[in-house]
Amino acid sequence: MLETALSELESRGVSLLESAHDASALEDARVEILGRKGALANAGKDLAKLPVEEKAKAGKLLNAAKQLLESIYERRKAEFEKAALDARLAAEWLDLTLPAPGPKPGSLHPLTQIQQELEDLFTSLGFAVVDGPEVETEWHNFDALNIPATHPARDMQDTFWVEGGYVLRTHTSPVQVRAMEKFGPPLKMIAPGRVFRNEEVDASHEHTFYQLEGMMIDRDVSVAHMLYFMKSLLKHIFGREVTVRLRPGYFPFVEPAFELDIQCLICGGSGCPVCKQSGWVELLPCGLVHPNVLRFSGIDPEEWNGFAFGLGLTRLVMMRYGIDDIRHLAGGDLRFLNQF
Ligand code: FA5
């Protein structure tokens, strides 16, 4: 009786273990057949109840069945372990001979790109590119530009004062003064750079922004010369005619003074937050250098005269690329910068 039962148990075990399709089905089969409370263990209990003379024979059969089933289990377990390892190796395979990806290439900030384009243009026109300090003397930033301490024009450029009579420069115009002092006439120079103002920040105003100063001192310089260079500048940057308007302006260091505005390229002139709904953006104030400014820098205004302009470089970048908020340019957000 027990012999028949054992042989049935053996074939059921063989079929369960052989047909397991994955490691977890194999484990289920092991528990059912070979486990502590499994079919073989139960058969062992039945065997204990047999009379002594039958016990030895049945015991041998049971052991043989156990060995067979255990060997099948071990073989199948090894098969699944190998398959799992192969799959992992295939998934994690790495070609160590491939060249490393290396650092991501960066690109120049749009402000730097336009600054460099303008430097190239103006050097080709015979201008020098000069630089000045960002922490300026009060003299260079204001007084030498015909803006004495009591002049109301100081209020138009409220700034950050540093102890000892220094200011964070409010414009690039002090570089005109330094260039006149250093080189004297005749002079053709541009000065791109960072400037600072105590400013209410909005879509078109930053407290820290960039300007590009231009100056030419020679004999018989006229407004026509000035317009020629400013038009060349705009044509170079936009590659096409853009609508501008020239209107009277006021700066103590030029006389006559003009404001050159560009029709807003964000809204096409219909009005938006960048142009404060006016359709025009202040971009390029300019004028003929005031005789006092020449005199302060040791140049004789009877012999020499000149023009100067102060381009809003950050605003120019906004117009060229259609950037509708100046704050994008200082944010350092790579999602924004990667577009250029
Ligand atoms: C000046 O700073 C004069 N130094 C320009 C000048 C030079 C006039 C030489 C005559 C001769 P203004 O404050 O307008 O002027 O600034 C010049 C330009 O800088 C503006 O037209 C504008 O385009 C830009 N700008 C001014 N304030 C800001 C600001 N807060 N944020 C961004 N751009 C500004």
Image (spheres, grey):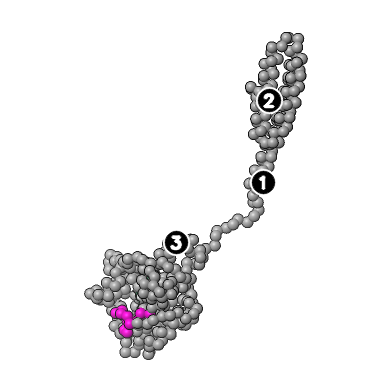
The answer to whether marks 2 and 1 mark residues whose Cβ atoms lie closer than 8 Å is no
Locate ligand 1 by image quadrant.
Answer: bottom left
**Percent from the top left, x then y, of residue 72?**
73, 29
Q: CA distance from mark 2 to mark 1?
A: 34 Å
Q: Position of residue 266 (x, y in %)?
A: 43, 71
Q: Residue 183: tell me if it is visible.
A: no
Label 1: which residue? 90
Mark closer to the chain start, 2 or 3 = 2
Q: Residue at x 57, y 58 (%)?
A: 102
Q: Read off the magenta span.
A: 248-260
Amino acid carrying label 2: it is Ile
Closer to the N terminus: mark 2 or mark 1? 2
Tell me the CA gap for discs 1 and 3.
41 Å
Residue 220 visible in the snapshot: yes
Q: Is residue 28 above or below residue 134?
A: above
Q: Nearer the viewer, residue 94 or 56?
A: 56
Estimate how packed mark 3 is, as few (under 14), some (14 to 19) or many (20 or more) residues with alpha carbons within 10 Å. Answer: few
Picture disc at residue 332 = 3
Secondary structure under tag 1 reads helix
Instruction: Kindly identify the residue that appears in the image at 67 percent across and 20 percent down.
Output: 41
Q: Residue type at mark 3?
A: Gly
